[in-house]
Amino acid sequence: MTDASAPQPPSALVYEVREEVTGALLPAHDWAVTGQCATGSGLAPGSTYAQRETGRGAALGAGVGARAGYLIAVAPPTAGKSSWWGVRATVGLDLALLYGRVDTGMSDVTGQLCAHVESGGESVQYRGSTVFLAQFTAAVGAQVGFGDASQSDGWHGLVFGAAIVPAVTYINPWVAGSSLDASFLGTELTLDFATMQYGTAQEDAKRLSLFLMLPPEDHGAMVATLSFGFVWH
């Protein structure tokens, strides 16, 4: 039986805002040449004579993000105790404008000889473009703090965190079509410079974060984000 009078771990709502630098490897596409080439006796689709090619763009830029969630300090800091740990869950939204090199397809071979198309080695074309990126994330993880618990105004120190971060990613290059993908292969590492009152879960901190999202399939997008933010309750 559970003892209803036993003290429960302290908990608190958590809020965070962050500035971000984001790099993205855009979704890959298989492209074929377009148009009809001349065979000498007529016309034929150029794609019959040229192999399909795979193109993948990449972009880098900056953005902003916000998080809201819940922190439970399973072993909260107490006077004389320099370490503590807890678990947290958050949802977040990140918005960024990137600039990069975007694949836009292969050339139109209309008017060319099919023999030339077959031997010419047509390649994927790229254009420079602004890319809008939006991500919705849901993180579940743990954090552990190490610091100084000798001061009368509370605990001060570093808090290391790690979380699993499923994400839904929307990518829209201005010169190509948009994509919407989901991945469960997101992870995040955080480092907080924090202050906490003894026996509470109320953490105020400056936070550095590194987020990496891998695609569930080879052709999907990959996103890496380095951010700096503020956490409060």
Image (tube, helix red, strand yellow):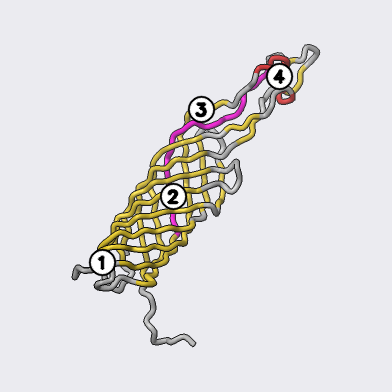
Q: Secondary structure at mark 2?
A: strand
Q: Name the N-terminal-most of marks 4 and 1.
A: 4
Q: Secondary structure at mark 1?
A: strand
Marks 2 and 1, how far apart at CA: 27 Å
Q: Please give left or right for residue 71 compared with residue 164 in the image.
A: left
Q: Where residue 211 is drawn, which disc sits there? A: 2
Disc 2 residue type (three-letter) = Phe
Most distant residue in the left direction: 152
Disc 4 residue type (three-letter) = Glu
Q: Name the N-terminal-most of marks 2 and 1.
A: 1
Instruction: Say which residue label 4 marks.
Output: 118
Q: Residues within 10 Å of mark 3 (few under 14, many from 20)?
A: some
Reply above or below: 70 against 36. Answer: below
Query: What is the magenta range?
Result: 91-110
Marks 2 and 3, how far apart at CA: 27 Å
Residue 220, horizontal then vertical, whole percent:
57, 43
